[in-house]
Image (cartoon, rainbow, N blue to C red):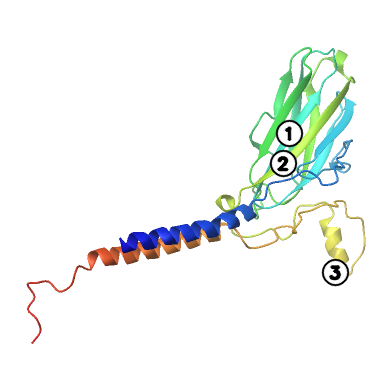
């Protein structure tokens, strides 16, 4: 009974301590405080419009245009990109595609979601979704794993009739991110995030030549800001439970004292 009470109290204390830590390690994204969401899109990687997580960017264009946006993603985050294209009143069947590239302009595969979708003739809109893999803090040079830095979103039509080319369309893009934390954490860290202009910025910090930094946003707490991960919490819980299990096993197996068949010492 005493062991049961000790185990219950220890688990309750660990649960209360782990709850806030786990919540702090994966903050939910929120909309921009100023509500100043972008209303236009870029036409290439270099002119991609910057958007933050939780913002809903809008843009107008024509079928056949390439629309580009960019957003930051840090270690332990799983970004989700959603796009809605509002089509003209009269149009034929057309296929739209949403592609996401990392800071090295490598196309990143979607973990799940409708990355490409065909709008039937006369459809009012088409919706696309791409859920990326969890951003890692480190990867081998030959790997295509998502790393912290700038990510690019490209939205375009890939199949349509010649009569529909150049018709006006409008698009809405939103990027959300979920903090995964410990389950996807890996050892090691990236020296510099994959952000355009990071090399120029590093030279400026060293007092070298100056130049334009192409990206103006980043993580609120800095890129890969700390060593903390909720894996530390669960490792501590496992260690305490193992110690309590050892104590409980010892108490249950040690017996009530000296066996009756053993004569007392003289």
Query: Residue drawn 85% across and 54% down?
Result: 197
58 on left or right of 190:
right
Q: Nearer the viewer, residue 125 or 1?
A: 1
Q: Is residue 212 visible?
A: yes
Mark 2 element type: strand
Neighbour class for label 1 at 10 Å: few (<14), some, many (≥20)? many
- Tell me the distance, in whole angstroms, between the alpha carbons under discs 1 and 2: 8 Å
- Asked if the residue under mark 3 is in contact with the one under mark 2, i.e. CB atoms within 8 Å, the reply is no
Neighbour class for label 2 at 10 Å: few (<14), some, many (≥20)? many
- Tell me the distance, in whole angstroms, between the alpha carbons under discs 3 and 1: 39 Å
227 on left or right of 105:
left
Query: Residue drawn 88% across and 65% down?
Result: 204
> Counting residues from the N terminus, which is met first, the one under dot 3 or under dot 1?
1
Mark 1 element type: strand
Mark 3 element type: loop
> Mark on residue 206?
3
Q: Residue extending furthest bottom?
A: 266
Q: Is residue 186 visible?
A: no
Could you say where residue 203 lies in the image, as x and y percent from the top left? 86, 64
Q: Quadrant of residue 106?
A: top right
- Asked if the residue under mark 2 is in contact with the one under mark 1, i.e. CB atoms within 8 Å, the reply is yes
Could you say where residue 79 lies in the image, as x and y percent from the top left? 69, 42
Tag 1 residue: 82
233 on left or right of 161:
left
Tag 2 residue: 176
> Mark on residue 116?
none
Q: Nearer the viewer, residue 241 or 96?
A: 241
Q: In the rendered view, tell whether residue 98 sits above or below residue 19.
A: above
Q: Nearer the viewer, mark 3 or mark 1?
A: 1
- Tell me the distance, in whole angstroms, between the alpha carbons under discs 2 and 3: 35 Å
Could you say where residue 134 lies in the image, as x and y percent from the top left? 63, 46
- Asked if the residue under mark 1 is in contact with the one under mark 3, i.e. CB atoms within 8 Å, the reply is no
């Amino acid at each position: 009974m005493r062991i049961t009470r000790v185990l219950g109290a220890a688990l309750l204390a660990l649960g209360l301590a782990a709850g806030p830590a786990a919540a702090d390690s994966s903050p939910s994204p929120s909309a921009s405080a100023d509500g100043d969401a972008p209303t236009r899109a870029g036409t290439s990687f270099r002119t991609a419009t910057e958007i933050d997580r939780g913002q809903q960017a809008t843009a107008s264009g024509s079928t056949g245009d390439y629309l580009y946006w960019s957003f930051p993603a840090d270690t332990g985050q799983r970004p989700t990109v959603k796009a809605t294209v509002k089509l003209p009143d009269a149009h034929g069947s057309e296929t739209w595609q949403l592609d996401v590239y990392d800071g090295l302009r490598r196309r990143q595969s979607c973990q799940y979601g409708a990355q490409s979708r065909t709008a039937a003739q006369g459809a009012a809109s088409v919706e696309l979704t791409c859920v990326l893999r969890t951003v890692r803090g480190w990867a081998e040079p030959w790997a295509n794993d998502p790393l912290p830095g700038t990510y690019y979103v490209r939205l375009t039509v890939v199949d349509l009739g010649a009569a529909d080319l150049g018709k006006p369309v409008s698009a809405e893009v939103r990027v959300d991110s979920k903090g995964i934390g410990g389950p996807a954490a890996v050892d090691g860290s990236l020296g510099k995030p994959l952000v355009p202009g990071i090399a120029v910025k590093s030279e400026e910090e060293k007092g070298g030549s100056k130049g334009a930094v192409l990206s103006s946003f980043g993580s609120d707490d800095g890129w890969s800001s700390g060593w903390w991960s909720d894996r530390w919490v669960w490792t501590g819980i496992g260690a305490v439970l193992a110690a309590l299990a050892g104590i409980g096993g010892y108490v249950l197996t040690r017996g009530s004292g000296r066996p009756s068949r053993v004569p007392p010492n003289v």
